[in-house]
Structures are given as C-alpha cells and as structure tokens.
Amino acid sequence: MKINHSIRVGIGVMALAVVASACGGGEPKNVLQSASEGTLTVGIKYDQPGLGLRNPDRTFTGFDIEVAKYVAGKLGVTPENITYKEAPSPQKETLIQNGEVDFVAATYTITDARKEKVDFAGPYYVAGQSLLVQSDNTDITGPDSLSDAKKLCSVSGSTSAQKIKDDFAQDVQLQEFDTYSACVEALRNGAVDALTTDDIILAGYAARYPGELKVVGEPFTQERYGIGLAKGDDEARAKINDAIDEMIADGSWERAFNDTVGESGYPIPSPPTVDRY
Ligand code: GLU
C-alpha cells in the first residue's frame, strides 16, 4: 500500500516535470541583462542557405547570422559568446516567450498578430512571397496559376501558409511541413508541385539546385523582417533598432548581404528604414 502510494506520487511528479518541460515554463529573457552577463542566445534557421544555415562543420552562416552578430557586437557581446538555437517557424514566439532565446533573427516577418506575443526591432530587410517549382515546369507562373488542385508546400506558422489559406485556399491543396528544407525535398521528388515562401529564401534553394529548381512570378506580399524579442523589452528594442540603423549606415549591411545572399545571384535591394513603433 505504502509502496503503491509512493510509486503513484513518483509518477505524478514525473508527469508534472514532463508537462513543465514541454511548455518550456521559463520567463522571457531581458536582452540587455543577458548581454551584460556577456552572452546571448539567438534563434536562427538552420536550413536556409544564404540566410541562416548550419554547415556540416557546425559553423553558422547567412545574412540573419551577420545581422545577429552585428547587433550582439553593439550590445557588447562577441561572436564566440553567441549561442545559436534552431528557431523553426512554428516555434519562434514560444522560444521568445519561454526565455529559450534572447532574440530571433530568422526570416521573421513583423506582423500585428505576432506583436500580441512578442516585440520586433527593425525591419532590417523586406522580402516578398513567391513560388519555387521544378525547372521544367511551365504551367505554374504565379499564385493565380495554382488552380486545378495543385499541391503546394509551405511551413506551418508562417505568413506564407497563412496567405495561401486566406487568399488561395479554394484552388490549392496546401501541405504544411515544419521546415522549408522538407518542402524542398518534397518538391524535388515530385510529391508537391510548388513551394511557397519568401523570394529571398527560395533564391537560396534555387541556387543550391541549379537547373533543377527555379523561382517563378512576381512577389505577391511584403515581408518585413524584424528581430523578435520579449514583449515589453523596450530598452533592448531601441538599442537593437540603433544597431540596425548603424549597420545600414556604416556599410556593414551591404557587405553582409553581398557575402551571403549575394552568392545566389539575388540582386541587392536598397535597405529598409527602421520602424520605431
Ligand atoms: N517571413 C515569413 C514568416 O515569418 C516566412 C519565413 C519563415 O517562415 O521563416 O513567416
């Protein structure tokens, strides 16, 4: 009887621990506090060439990484003291809210819906949603040619998937994956007809598979990339906005773009104006 009771209590405690860790349970971080302690944890993408990529040797490269490093530097944190954490699209807000990252720099569009949960510095870049198809495809030329129940892949929790649900749901069969690289594999092996997300992300995949994949049509949304951080961390947001302004003004923004995204042949646009809302 006694043993049974303690086993039951033990299982109860274990169940609670599992629930707590599944929810993360932590408090959001204060970016300037972390920086004053000398380290920052930054949420990035691991699978988006040119933007946020974990290389086989476990180094990280891409425009988002360069922006994160520049911002961290302005907050007094050196690149060796940045810890990167993967921030898949469906988890970005949660990672910030639970304090698992200080900020997210991961092709993260500033939206009013997301602003209910997190705040944004920036924008540091403006992209637009587009389509990626196999190079020999001739019938998909833009979002309006997705009729006839074409199979379209995107990532859950992204503005790209939401846009399709809002505006093109009648015409397409949307399949939502956790990452764009999973969509790329589905596109390459013919399981889907097209992949939709931001043009700058798609350009990186097209450059990785030349002659196999191509970007089609004109961009049909505006995606203003911000640095996501805890809601109400206004002091840090102002400092990060200053850092983005400086990155643009001192030429580092252009250099970073050319060294990363530029390699795919994607032309450099003019930098955006930071929006201090
Ligand atoms: N920029 C879009 C978004 O924030 C798509 C890219 C992504 O999922 O990271 O949802």
Image (spheres, rainbow, N blue to C red):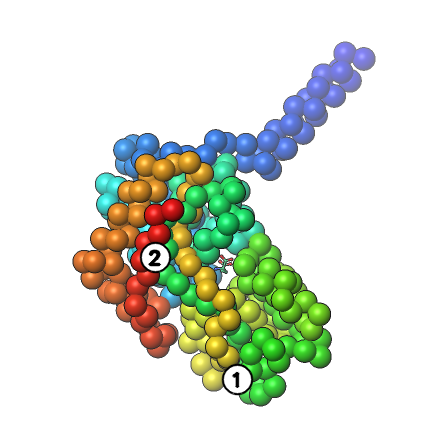
Q: Badge 1, how many Cα within 10 Å: few under 14, some, many 20+?
A: some
In the picture provided, is 228 more to the left or to the right than 188? left
* Nearest the eye: 206 or 158: 158
Compare marks 2 and 1 and give the one earlier in the sequence.
Answer: 2
Q: Is residue 200 visible?
A: yes
- Above or below, 102 relative to 105: above
Residue at left offset 64%, top offset 73%: 192
Asked if labels 1 and 2 touch by Cβ distance under 8 angstroms, the answer is no
Q: Which is closer to the viewer, label 2 or label 1?
A: 2
Ligand 1 neighbours mark 2 (CB distance < 8 Å): no
Q: Secondary structure at mark 2?
A: strand
Percent of width and height locating residue 57: 37, 58
Q: Outermost residue toward the right?
A: 1
| Residue 55 occupies quadrant | bottom left
Query: How many marks can you see?
Result: 2
Please give the residue where the numbered disc 1 appears in the rendered image: 135
In the picture provided, is 120 more to the left or to the right than 76? right
- Above or below, 211 relative to 101: below
Percent of width and height locating residue 197: 52, 66
- Which residue type carries mark 2? Tyr
In the picture provided, is 160 more to the left or to the right than 46? right
Q: Badge 2, how many Cα within 10 Å: few under 14, some, many 20+?
A: many
Residue at left offset 39%, top offset 50%: 227
Q: Secondary structure at mark 1?
A: loop
Percent of width and height locating residue 136: 55, 87
Q: Quadrant of the N terminus?
A: top right
Spatial CA distance of label 2 from label 1 is 31 Å
**Residue 124's mark?**
2
* Nearest the eye: 161 or 112: 112
Percent of width and height locating residue 37: 29, 32
- Which residue type carries mark 1? Ser
* Nearest the eye: 157 or 36: 157
